[in-house]
Image: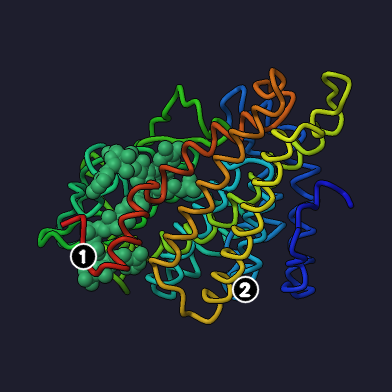
């Protein structure tokens, strides 16, 4: 079999429909052709390759499950997951761009917006004509977003927005920002802020050693006049942004498998080619242990993601179940990246191979969308009924 398509140790393809496989093939072929050959170079330069935006839109990565009437691909949750998996096989930073656009910008406009907002923004976001970002995290409020200080006041004919967001993916080039801020009563609402509004700026964050091919920045609001029609009317409170995170975390649980697959494939291939002591290194038991553990963990993660996809499709997945998959699968991927890097010896640190880039990228993935420890505490709260955050 083509190693790029592997691994599928438990023949999980049997669980997929023809549509799932077609969507996956389209994403896979596009990543192989348009992302993998250029991405190392962009990561080294610390630049987002804007030329791939059109291709991301074409494979349905912008709003995979948003209905056709709003320009989305109208697919199910498993197709969404498979697209994220294939993109992250290329690079977690590219998957981040797609996650943010779909789950953190299009999703809230679709779910919490009115019809005018859906029609104004969703088709342009689906086609990639406009790119979006999501502002929840602040300099002093990361894991505890409920403490945010960004706020807006009702000025009669508009809102006046003040505050700052930090670590925002896509911020430096986004035309549209979905921003979470408190009103005068301290209630959290979503506002659509557009580039060009006076007092709104998006300085880029430099010197990242992780997600270098993804642009990250701040969102600064200095008395920004936001038209009243830009408030998302249909949901407020912390549950509104957390609902978006459920969708993004689900996609990350699938995406991380893609990064792990690429590291495993690379290490497996290398272990059969690299000769030391007169043998391929794959013949040594210590190297076989690494590969055997990798394929076991990938297979478990695939099953977790697939079943979660079934539950997302029928609307029964709980936020805690999503947390478990995000936490497990990202941890699985970061461990595989680290082991795979060692298997390549000195070559493991070189940009000739993708492993070190995946390894560094996953340091962000294990932190954003809720850190590894925050997700553990969500599981802990779910099973004990006792809240460690309060
Ligand atoms: P808590 O009191 O537990 O909950 C507040 C309200 O929210 C409801 N809720 C949820 N609703 C929907 N989905 C969820 N997952 C929900 N979790 C909780 C909850 O029922 C409650 O509703 P109500 O009506 O009673 O008010 O909230 P808390 O303040 O104790 O915090 C809980 C905690 C720590 C789990 C949460 O705040 C959290 O998840 N923190 C992590 C922050 C985080 O994930 N930030 C991500 C920023 S975005 C990002 O990283 C993008 S990276 C993208 C990329 O590049 O791919
Ligand atoms: P902190 O919350 O300060 O956490 C520091 C440490 O303390 C962590 O290990 C954490 O697990 C631990 N900790 C915190 N609270 C507890 C507790 N109660 N119990 C035990 N341990 C605890 N945010 C957005 O809004 N939009 C984006 O697009 C976005 N993109 C990002 C892109 C990148 C590359 C990165 C790195 C981050 C991005 N983020 C984004 C922000 C991300 O969600 C936050 O970094 C993350 O939620 C953690 O917040 P923090 O960095 O403030 O860490």
Crowd band around label 2 with a 10 angstrom C-alpha radius: few (<14), some (14–19), many (20+): some
Q: What's the residue at 11%, 58% (across, down)?
A: 184
Q: Position of residue 185 (x, y in %)?
A: 10, 62
Give the mark toward the camera: 2 or 1. 1
- Residue 266 in the figure: left or right of residue 44: right
Going 53% across and 39% down the picture, which residue do you hit?
Answer: 362
> What secondary structure is found at the residue carrying circle 1?
loop
Q: Is mark 2 within 8 Å of ligand 1?
A: no
Q: Is mark 1 within 8 Å of ligand 1?
A: no
Rendered view: 350 above or below 296: above
For this view, does 29 lie left or right of residue 66? right
- Quadrant housing residue 290: top right
Residue 267 appears in the rendering: yes
Residue at the disc numbered 1: 386
Q: Is residue 332 above or below residue 318?
A: above
Residue identified by numbered label 2: 76
Give whichever of 190, 227 is nearer the camera: 190
Q: Residue furthest front?
A: 285
- Spot occupied by residue 33 in the image (x, y as percentages of width and height): 81, 43
Ligand 1 - quadrant of the structure image: bottom left
Q: Secondary structure at mark 2?
A: loop
Q: Residue at x 62, y 23 (%)?
A: 44
Q: Residue at x 56, y 26 (%)?
A: 46
Position in image of residue 56 (x %, y %): 67, 51
Q: Tell me if mark 1 has few (under 14), some (14-19) or many (20+) residues whose alpha carbon lies within 10 angstroms of its own.
A: few
Find residue 370 and report its horizontal and vertical position in percent: 37, 50
Q: For this view, does 347 lie left or right of residue 303?
A: right
Please identify the quadrant where the C terminus is shown: bottom left
Can residue 135 be seen at all in this image of the molecule? Answer: no
């Amino acid at each position: 079999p083509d190693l790029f398509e592997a691994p599928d140790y438990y023949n999980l393809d049997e669980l997929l429909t023809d549509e799932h496989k077609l969507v996956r093939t389209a994403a896979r072929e596009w990543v192989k052709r348009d992302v993998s050959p250029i991405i190392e170079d962009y990561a080294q330069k610390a630049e987002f390759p804007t030329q791939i935006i059109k291709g991301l839109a074409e494979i349905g990565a912008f709003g995979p499950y948003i209905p056709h009437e709003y320009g989305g691909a109208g697919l199910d949750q498993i197709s969404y997951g498979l697209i994220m998996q294939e993109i992250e096989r290329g690079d977690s930073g590219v998957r981040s761009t797609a996650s943010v656009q779909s789950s953190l910008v299009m999703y809230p406009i679709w779910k919490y917006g009115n019809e005018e907002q859906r029609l104004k923004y969703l088709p342009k976001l689906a086609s990639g004509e406009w790119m979006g970002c999501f502002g929840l995290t602040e300099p002093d409020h990361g894991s505890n977003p409920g403490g945010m200080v960004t706020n807006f006041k009702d000025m009669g004919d508009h809102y006046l927005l003040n505050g700052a967001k930090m670590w925002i993916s896509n911020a430096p080039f986004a035309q549209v920002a979905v921003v979470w801020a408190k009103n005068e009563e301290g209630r959290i609402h979503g506002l659509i802020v557009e580039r060009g509004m006076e007092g709104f700026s998006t300085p880029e964050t430099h010197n990242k050693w992780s997600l270098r091919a993804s642009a990250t920045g701040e969102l600064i609001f200095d008395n920004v006049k936001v038209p009243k029609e830009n408030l998302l009317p249909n949901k407020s409170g912390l549950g509104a942004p957390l609902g978006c995170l459920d969708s993004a975390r689900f996609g990350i649980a699938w995406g991380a498998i893609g990064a792990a697959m690429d590291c495993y494939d690379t290490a497996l291939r290398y272990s059969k080619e690299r000769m030391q002591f007169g043998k391929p290194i794959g013949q040594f038991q210590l190297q076989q242990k690494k590969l055997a553990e990798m394929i076991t963990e990938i297979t478990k993660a695939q099953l977790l993601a697939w079943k979660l996809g079934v539950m997302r499709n029928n609307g029964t997945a709980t936020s805690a179940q999503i947390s478990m998959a995000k936490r497990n699968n990202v941890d699985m991927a970061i461990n595989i990246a680290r082991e795979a890097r060692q298997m390549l010896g000195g070559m493991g640190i070189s940009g000739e191979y993708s492993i070190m880039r995946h390894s560094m990228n996953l340091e962000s993935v294990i932190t954003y969308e809720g850190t590894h420890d925050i997700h553990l505490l969500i599981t802990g709260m779910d099973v004990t009924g006792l809240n460690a955050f309060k």
